[in-house]
Amino acid sequence: MSFKWVCPIIPLGLPSHFLESIDIPFNNIKVHDSVYGGSGYTYFPGSHDVGAFNITVYMDSLGTSLKWLMAWKALIKDFDTGAYQLPSVYKQTWKVLLLNTKNDVILEAELQGTWPSDTSAFTLNYTDNGRLTLTQAFSIDNAKINFVL
């Protein structure tokens, strides 16, 4: 049920009602080099990796979501001087809870070591009457999945 979730921890204080969607990535094990023997290949596991995840936020008339995002990016790099901060300054943790039909928490996802990377462009036109949204990709170090029920 993709509609039964809450995000009680959004880094750097963005109010949760701005968050329209979030992807939950998983740890993946890469396939390492194979060994050929007995007329076939045997494969072994390699290192693990977590793919980037995306969120979608909506824009209000004060630009709250964009201000939040720009403030986070300013923690990573000073775009005027080119100076970067240490990861301990900008890497943050998200928490996402999946709920059942009774609103009991069934799964808790903790997204660790995240920071904003690619930001979608605004597409502006005079023929669209929809809301303005922003899609943001995040780099991530680890995804911890805990089953509660």
Image (cartoon, rainbow, N blue to C red):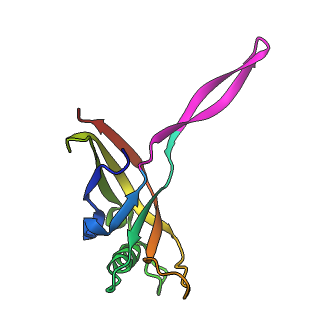
Q: Is residue 48 above or below residue 114?
A: above
Q: Nearer the viewer, residue 84 or 95?
A: 95
Q: Nearer the viewer, residue 42 or 86?
A: 42
Asked if residue 35 is among those painted magenta in the image, a careful observer would answer yes
The x, y position of residue 77, in whole percent, is 44, 76
Q: Nearer the viewer, residue 79 or 148?
A: 148
Q: Is residue 46 above or below residue 58?
A: above
Residue placed furthest toward the top: 38
Q: Residue at x 44, y 47 (%)?
A: 25
Task: State which quadrant residue 92 falls in.
Answer: bottom left
Q: Residue at x 20, y 45 (%)?
A: 103
**Would residue 14 be found to the left or right of residue 50 on screen?**
left
Highlighted magenta segment, given as a residue range: 24-47
**Would residue 125 be found to the left or right of residue 17 on screen?**
right
Q: Residue at x 49, y 80 (%)?
A: 82
The x, y position of residue 1, in whole percent, is 36, 44
Q: Is residue 23 above or below residue 127?
A: above
Asked if residue 61 is among those painted magenta in the image, a careful observer would answer no
**Would residue 67 be found to the left or right of residue 100 on screen?**
right
Q: Is residue 38 above or below residue 134?
A: above
Q: How many marks?
A: 0
Q: Quadrant of the C terminus?
A: top left
Q: Main secondary structure of the magenta part?
A: strand
